[in-house]
Image: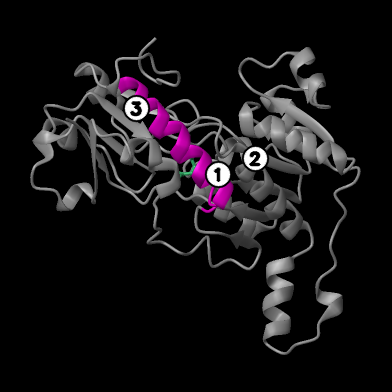
Amino acid sequence: MFRVLVSDKIDELGLAPLLTNDQIEVVQKNVAEVDDLDSYDAILVRSATKVTAEVIEKMPRLKIIGRAGVGVDNIDLAAATAKGINVVNAPWGNIVSTAEHTFAMMMALVRSIPQAHNSLKNHEWKRSSFLGTELKGKTLGLIGFGRVGTELAKRAVAFEMNVLAYSRSITPERAEKYGAKAATFEDILRESDIISVHTGLTEQTRGLLNAESLAKTKKGVLIINCARGGIVDEKALQELLASGHVAGAALDVYSQEPPTDFSLIDMDNVIVTPHIAASTKEAQLNVAVMVAEEVLNFAQGKPVQNSVNFP
Ligand code: MLT
């Protein structure tokens, strides 16, 4: 029997191929509450469970780790790879939801929708306090032009924005395909009215938008991070929001989740959501299906498609 531990809440419909296979036993329980960790061949997680080197050490039978989502920063990849454990993710399942949420945050930011909503809910009628700006004609700088960045570009172009795209491998042709213009990191900083990050969190991207780079942005710039906490240096952002250089920020992700320091979140010109960009019915079903299929293929000795640590 191939035993699969499902440690986070993963869509049951998506898990059906595993749940209905009589060669596979699925246990849905948080890793911290499991006594017989040494009896599992696979573990499936979202982002809440941290698959640390310590967890991996306690699972000597483990052969595959499935991440129902994109980011694998909650998995100790080096420890998994050293033990020959395959780590697979679901890179396509939630990109539209993430792009749509980012777009919603951008619109909410330029029209102060959360602030206006709270004001009216407090029985105030302050129309003149909420003077917004249009997106049309504004420059959106995308840092990271992969699956989510390109989806965002398509939507921004439909709103008649100018889109600048930067990634390490950007080419003019790739940018043009999505209606964007290829740019350098410096161009993005200098020319954008709104900057949105769409990279993974790696040692190269940690603190990419920090005091030094943010100081090069236009006065009044808006910053959006619906990718990963830590790409934008929160202390630097807070200081520039306080000084007025950055006019506003929209955040879905935080360097610590759940956050314990609320000083940035509490600022009036910061709008926030609790890491829900990928939380739609469609996305959660998609990622569950993708990762369950990968684990099923693996259990049956077939190749997997989305390994992040093995060719
Ligand atoms: C992802 O990496 O797929 C998203 O941030 C959603 C999640 O963490 O589950």
Image quarter of the N terminus: top left
Q: Is residue 143 above or below residue 13?
A: above
Dot 3, how many residues are within 10 Å of its Cα: few (below 14), some (14-19), or many (20+)? many
Residue 16 at x, y percent in the picture: 39, 41
Kind of residue at disc 1: Ala
Q: Which mark is residue 296?
A: 3
State the colouring used for the structure image.
one colour
Image point 47% across, 50% down: which residue?
254
Q: Which mark is residue 21?
A: none
Dot 1, how many residues are within 10 Å of its Cα: few (below 14), some (14-19), or many (20+)? many
Residue 59 at x, y percent in the picture: 13, 32
Residue 75 at x, y percent in the picture: 31, 34
Q: As rendered, which of 253 and 249 lies closer to the eye?
A: 253
Name the secondary structure under disc 1. helix
Kind of residue at disc 2: Val
Image point 41% across, 32% down: which residue?
291
- The alpha-carbon separation of the residues under discs 2 and 1 comes to 8 Å
Q: Disc 2 vs disc 1: Cβ atoms closer than 8 Å?
A: yes
Q: As rendered, which of 18 and 232 lies closer to the eye?
A: 18
Which residue, given by chain and number where applicable, does mark 2 sit on? 96
Q: Nearer the viewer, mark 2 or mark 3?
A: 3
Q: Is residue 269 above or below residue 146?
A: below
213 vs 155, left or right, is: left
Image point 71% across, 75% down: which residue?
117
Which residue, given by chain and number where applicable, does mark 1 sit on? 283
The stretch in magenta equals 276-298
Task: Identify the image quadrant of residue 193.
Answer: top right
Q: Is residue 110 above or below residue 1?
A: below
